[in-house]
């Protein structure tokens, strides 16, 4: 969050971060909540001035600050609460994936956040699962000997 | 809410609350004090020095409870979530303070305040609500009598999950002298009884949410320095073992058992036969792996180290126990009390957290009472029928409940801490105490870890490792570096004395800096990622890789704040902070004769382990003290500060004050 606010607005602030982390400290869990850049993004559909648009290169839903009129319809439409309101400039702000080089990913020590294509993510998942299965089989065979 | 303060990194305001007058003031931060003492621990000490009446009752309205976050808190550097809490300690009667991790420091700064300074006493149980400019003293009668977890949960449910809460539990309300303040469920501002001070002010909790922002003096340079610091940590050989995230701080327990510095049964022995049963590996395998949604340690703000190993007990007698187990808690409730049952140890540690008691002082007090029972000084009847013997886990758990509630004879005795309990027992019990300046000693034996031991003798808050934390003496890989820095070939040899004065002097200075700016001990004394150690390792060919990265706090602070600092200035600033704490303590009557170790460590020899026969030699202690006082510029005879030292450190107001009180040493 600090990396995010510094990369986007040059200050350190939890409030101005585009990504949020919800902490469940009692249970020992933290969940990062970014914008998911939905394929059929409700925010895009409701934006009356086309201030929100899809970036061709990164496929991210990004905001043209000059076109935003601060109506906050996108905030109402977003099911994840990923769009935030800047009370000073009277416009919204949201994650733009740093146009392909997300600051949050660079500073994520545990690699809890990674930046990749959906295909690649699926591949990582099924490969890891396969590794687990293999080692389970190995263990079983060893035990049988 | 852009900070208009002259220096970057700071929020630029102090929040001052007088509870007696129900007065809330926001005053500009002191530029001069920030230059001299940086923030956090340094600034807390300055506030106490300037404003605390010398005769203030620690549990009376005159005591001042300060919370201060340092200038680099919340600024993305590695391990920068820490803040400092200070007051006159009810346990020791001298300067008390504790450093704590988590997120509250950053939230406080984002709300616009570097420091929260609480004076007076509220009429009824209250909590302090802070959201940016809105600061309120709110009713907490619905929270009084509840423990830490429930209090925190209720406040988060009422105010919102984004509020970070610091709370006290029942122990503080009931007047346990080593009650602590628990931040964000699990983080303890543990030592010296600051929770009892908070309770005496009728403050149950502090809830903070900051929506503001922080800026740095030179953003470009700042990111360079911080990126370098991150890489320095990542390249540190200790960090690369991955032990802290995987196993948490209890990882050192087995090492201590092998090296012979793990105290067993109240320091009567140095080898624990059940060490494996209570080891970090055992904890991971039984309570942690796959039982938490995300395996691995949990972190404070911006911390790569994530040393909190979270675990859950899912069945049996202690089912439902959860939280993070730390080394001092497992060392205290385990070996120190002779208990080899990990479930009981884990449960005991979490009870201490929830009741809000310092696990170190609590476990030491129980271990001390156990020894008294074993020696026949106390009988079962003296302790309400609880059979408090070494190794009796059920009795230990029962004692914790009784102490937290100050219930019966056991509760009343236990709530006093070791030194006062010994006095109350009489019958020569004070012969067996293991305290320095009234504070209980941690789980590292000073007869073996002599650097730690000398650190306990001189530490400004009493027997504690975190003033110096010279882990380097335990790690032979740093032998050449330690030899160069501390001037002795014995520097990395346990149970020797060579280089210990310089070692403690240097570590104390660096610790004063990190506590004051808001970084963590582990970055500079556990991992040795700070300048000039990686550079020295490279010089001796002990480091892989071509480029050398290191944490350069001087450049880091300069880039963040705009206060110009060199490495040499940094050492001087550390000296200044340590000397200020000494000045405070001299006002409370601390002299050379208090800078010592208890009889057990000076006279009783270690009975087992590789350093069997070792004592902390009295003459070695005296020689180290002489050398140390010379390094610090304190008077060898009395332990008072010399006039020339205060002049050299630019502490003219302190000089004037000590002169008036007749507490200045001649040359």
Image (cartoon, coloured by chain):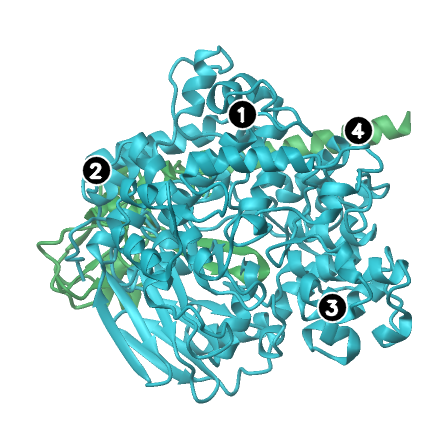
Chain colours: A green, B cyan
Residue beneath disc 3: B400
**Label 2 vs 1, first from the N-terminus:** 1
Q: Chain of mark 2?
A: B
Res A58 → quadrant: top left
For residue B51, above or below residue B610: below
- Residue at (53%, 69%) from the top-left corner? B195
For residue A29, above or below residue B557: below
Whether residues under marks 1 and 3 lie with C-beta atoms below 8 angstroms apart, the answer is: no
Q: Chain of mark 4?
A: B
Q: CA distance from mark 2 to mark 4?
A: 48 Å
Q: Secondary structure at mark 4?
A: loop
Q: Please identify the quadrant where the C terminus of chain A is shown.
A: top right
Residue beneath disc 1: B237
Residues at marks 2 and 1, common chain? yes
Few, some or many residues within 10 Å of mark 3 (<14, 14–19, 20+): many
Q: Secondary structure at mark 1?
A: helix
Whether residues under marks 2 and 1 lie with C-beta atoms below 8 angstroms apart, the answer is: no
- Residue at (44%, 35%) from the top-left corner? B630
Q: CA distance from mark 1 to mark 3?
A: 39 Å
**Label 2 vs 4, first from the N-terminus:** 2
Residue beneath disc 2: B564
Can you give x and y, in whole percent of width and height, for residue A48 in the image? 15, 63
């Amino acid at each position: 969050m600090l990396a995010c606010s510094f990369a986007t607005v040059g200050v350190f602030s939890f409030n101005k971060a585009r990504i949020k982390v919800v902490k469940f400290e009692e249970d020992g869990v933290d969940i990062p909540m970014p914008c998911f850049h939905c394929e059929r993004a409700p925010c895009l559909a409701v934006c009356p001035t086309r201030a929100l648009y899809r970036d061709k290169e990164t496929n991210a839903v990004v905001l043209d600050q000059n076109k935003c009129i601060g109506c906050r319809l996108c905030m109402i439409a977003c099911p994840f609460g990923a769009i935030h309101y800047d009370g000073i400039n009277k416009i919204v702000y949201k994650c733009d994936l740093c146009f392909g080089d997300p600051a949050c990913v660079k500073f994520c020590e545990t690699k809890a956040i990674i930046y990749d294509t959906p295909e690649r993510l699926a591949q990582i998942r099924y490969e890891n699962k396969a590794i687990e299965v293999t080692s389970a089989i190995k263990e079983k065979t060893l035990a049988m000997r | 809410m852009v900070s208009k303060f002259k220096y970057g990194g700071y929020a630029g305001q102090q929040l001052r609350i007088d509870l007696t007058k129900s007065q809330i003031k926001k005053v500009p931060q002191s530029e001069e004090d920030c230059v001299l003492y940086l923030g956090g621990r340094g600034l807390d000490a300055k506030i106490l020095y300037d404003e605390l009446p010398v005769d203030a009752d620690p549990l009376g309205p005159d005591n001042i409870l300060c919370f201060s976050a340092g200038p680099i808190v919340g600024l993305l550097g590695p391990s920068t979530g820490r803040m400092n809490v200070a007051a006159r300690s009810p346990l020791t009667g001298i300067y008390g303070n504790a450093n704590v991790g988590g997120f509250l420091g950053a939230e406080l700064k984002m709300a616009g305040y570097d420091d929260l300074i609480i004076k007076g006493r509220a009429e009824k149980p209250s909590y302090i609500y802070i959201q940016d400019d809105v600061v309120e003293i709110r009713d907490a009668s619905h929270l009084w009598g509840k423990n830490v977890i429930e209090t925190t949960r209720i406040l988060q449910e009422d105010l919102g999950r984004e509020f970070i809460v610091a709370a006290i539990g029942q122990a503080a309300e009931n007047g346990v002298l080593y009650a602590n303040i628990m931040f964000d469920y699990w983080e303890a501002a543990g030592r010296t009884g600051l929770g009892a001070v908070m309770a005496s002010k009728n403050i149950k909790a502090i809830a903070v949410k900051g929506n503001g922002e922080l800026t740095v003096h030179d953003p470009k340079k700042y990111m360079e320095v911080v990126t370098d610091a991150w890489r320095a940590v990542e390249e540190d050989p200790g960090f690369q073992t991955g032990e802290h995230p995987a196993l948490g701080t209890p990882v050192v327990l087995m090492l201590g058992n092998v090296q012979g510095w793990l105290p067993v049964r109240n320091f009567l022995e140095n080898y624990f036969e059940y060490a494996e049963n209570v080891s970090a590996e055992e904890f991971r395998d039984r309570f942690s792996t796959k039982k938490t949604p995300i395996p691995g340690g949990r972190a404070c703000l911006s911390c790569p180290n994530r040393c909190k190993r979270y675990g859950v007990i899912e069945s049996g007698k202690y089912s439902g126990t959860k939280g993070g187990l730390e080394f001092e808690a497992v060392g205290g409730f385990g070996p120190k009390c002779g208990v080899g049952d990990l479930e009981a140890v884990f449960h005991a540690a979490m009870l201490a957290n929830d009741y809000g008691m310092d696990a170190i002082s609590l476990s030491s007090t129980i271990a001390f009472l156990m020894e008294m029972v074993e020696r026949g000084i106390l009988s079962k009847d003296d302790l309400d029928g609880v059979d408090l013997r070494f190794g009796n886990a059920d009795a230990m758990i029962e004692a914790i409940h009784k102490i937290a509630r100050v219930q019966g004879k056991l509760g009343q005795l236990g709530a006093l801490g070791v030194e006062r309990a010994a006095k109350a027992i009489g019958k020569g019990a004070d012969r067996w105490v293991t305290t320095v300046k009234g504070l209980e000693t941690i789980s590292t034996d000073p007869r073996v870890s002599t650097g730690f031991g000398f650190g306990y003798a001189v530490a400004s808050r009493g027997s504690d490792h975190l003033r110096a934390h010279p882990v380097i003496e335990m790690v032979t890989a740093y032998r050449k570096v330690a030899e160069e820095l501390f001037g002795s070939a014995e520097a990395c040899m346990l149970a020797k004395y060579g280089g210990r004065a310089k070692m403690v002097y240097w570590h104390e200075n660096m610790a004063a800096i990190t506590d004051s700016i808001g970084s963590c001990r582990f970055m500079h004394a556990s991992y040795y990622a700070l300048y000039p150690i990686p550079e020295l390792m490279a010089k001796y060919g002990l480091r892989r890789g071509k480029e050398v990265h290191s944490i350069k706090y001087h450049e880091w602070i300069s880039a963040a704040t705009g206060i110009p600092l060199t490495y040499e200035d940094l050492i001087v600033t550390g000296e200044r902070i340590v000397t200020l704490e000494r000045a405070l303590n001299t006002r409370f009557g601390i002299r050379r004769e208090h800078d010592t170790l208890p009889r057990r460590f000076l006279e009783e020899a270690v009975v087992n382990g590789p350093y069997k026969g070792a004592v902390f030699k009295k003459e070695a202690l005296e020689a180290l003290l002489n050398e140390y006082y010379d390094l610090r510029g304190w008077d060898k005879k009395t332990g008072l500060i010399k006039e020339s030292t205060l002049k050299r450190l630019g502490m003219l107001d302190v000089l004037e004050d000590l002169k008036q009180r007749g507490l200045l040493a001649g040359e």
